[in-house]
């Protein structure tokens, strides 16, 4: 999976091991920080407001959606804020978005898995995760999972924790699709303990995606390089 982490105009990391080491060291300083801490919520508001200014149609998903739907708050021991959006929309905006976050002093990691794009923004113990999805035959697909499109669209806006957030159309049913029993709190490091099998891409889709990623490998490397150059161009213009 081609990826790059950029902290500033003169600080980029390309190797996967070095990226993971940097992120682990960066976040370990704040490992005990609760996502519901006012400082973290303020940063979530700041980041989502930037997405709003770009008029991006995103939706809150997975563990973040679960906490908001079940508890009306973020899961205290979680350290991800999960957002999905159309993969092409993310690709079209990723360089400009990344340059803004980097200028805010937030390290940004961008990864490409064939047609699937992801971007992580880091602030203390918060990993703000943007995942790109592809629409195909009534499902939204990412690298591992599929989500019924009719549970996601049309996107709606709801207020949680004092922040206006874009949520899927039917958050309760989407949580029911993702989790074995979304109303029961389960603390486990193993996804199989709480994720339903139905969410996983089936055999044919899984290997079709892997074949597509293999075919697109060199094109993906070239895309990452182009995105990096665009980010640096934006950073130079914003100095």
Image: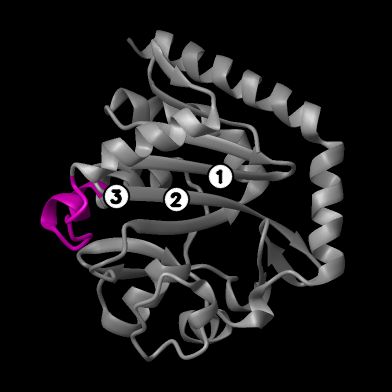
Q: Do the residues labelled 2 and 3 touch (CB within 8 Å)?
A: no
Residue 156, position in %: x, y? 46, 70
Instruction: State the residue in front, 108 or 22.
Output: 22
Query: Which portion, as a residue range, is magenta?
Result: 30-43
Q: Is residue 226 above or below residue 127?
A: above
Disc 2 residue crowd, few under 14, some 14–19, many 20+, Cα 10 Å: some
Tell me which label, 3 or 1, sits earlier in the chain.
Answer: 1
Q: Is residue 63 above or below residue 48?
A: below
To which quarter of the image does residue 7 belong?
Answer: top left
Q: Name the residue tied to disc 1.
A: 118
Tell me which label, 1 or 2, sits earlier in the chain.
Answer: 1
Disc 3 residue crowd, few under 14, some 14–19, many 20+, Cα 10 Å: many
Instruction: State the residue in front, 60 or 16.
Output: 16
Residue 225, position in %: x, y? 64, 19
For image coordinates 36% across by 48% down, the residue present is 127
Instruction: State the residue in front, 21 or 43.
Output: 21
Q: In this view, does 155 lie above or below 57?
A: below
To which quarter of the image does residue 174 belong?
Answer: bottom right
Residue 14 badge: none
Residue 221, position in %: x, y? 71, 26
Residue 238, position in %: x, y? 36, 14
**Image quarter hosting the C terminus:** top left
Q: Name the residue tied to disc 3.
A: 126
Q: Name the residue tied to disc 2.
A: 129
């Amino acid at each position: 999976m081609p990826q790059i982490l950029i902290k500033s105009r003169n600080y980029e990391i390309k190797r996967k091991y070095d990226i993971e080491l940097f992120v682990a060291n960066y976040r370990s300083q704040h490992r005990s920080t609760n996502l519901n801490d006012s400082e973290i919520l303020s940063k979530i508001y700041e980041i989502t407001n930037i997405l709003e200014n770009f008029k991006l149609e995103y939706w809150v998903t997975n563990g973040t959606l679960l906490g908001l739907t079940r508890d009306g708050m973020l899961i205290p021991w979680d350290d991800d804020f999960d957002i999905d959006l159309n993969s092409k929309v993310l690709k079209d905006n990723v360089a400009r978005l990344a340059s803004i976050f980097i200028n805010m002093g937030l390290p940004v990691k961008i990864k490409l898995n064939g047609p699937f794009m992801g971007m992580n923004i880091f602030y203390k113990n918060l990993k703000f995760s943007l995942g790109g999805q592809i629409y195909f035959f009534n499902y939204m697909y990412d690298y591992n999972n599929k989500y019924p499109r009719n549970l996601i669209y049309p996107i709606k806006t709801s207020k949680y924790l004092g922040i206006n957030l874009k949520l899927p159309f039917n958050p309760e049913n989407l949580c029911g699709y993702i989790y074995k029993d979304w109303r029961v709190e389960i603390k486990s490091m193993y996804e199989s303990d709480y994720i339903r099998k139905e969410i996983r891409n089936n055999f044919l889709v899984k290997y079709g995606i892997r074949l597509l990623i293999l075919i697109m490998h060199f094109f993906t490397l070239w895309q990452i390089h182009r995105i990096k150059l665009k980010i640096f161009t934006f950073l130079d213009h914003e100095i």
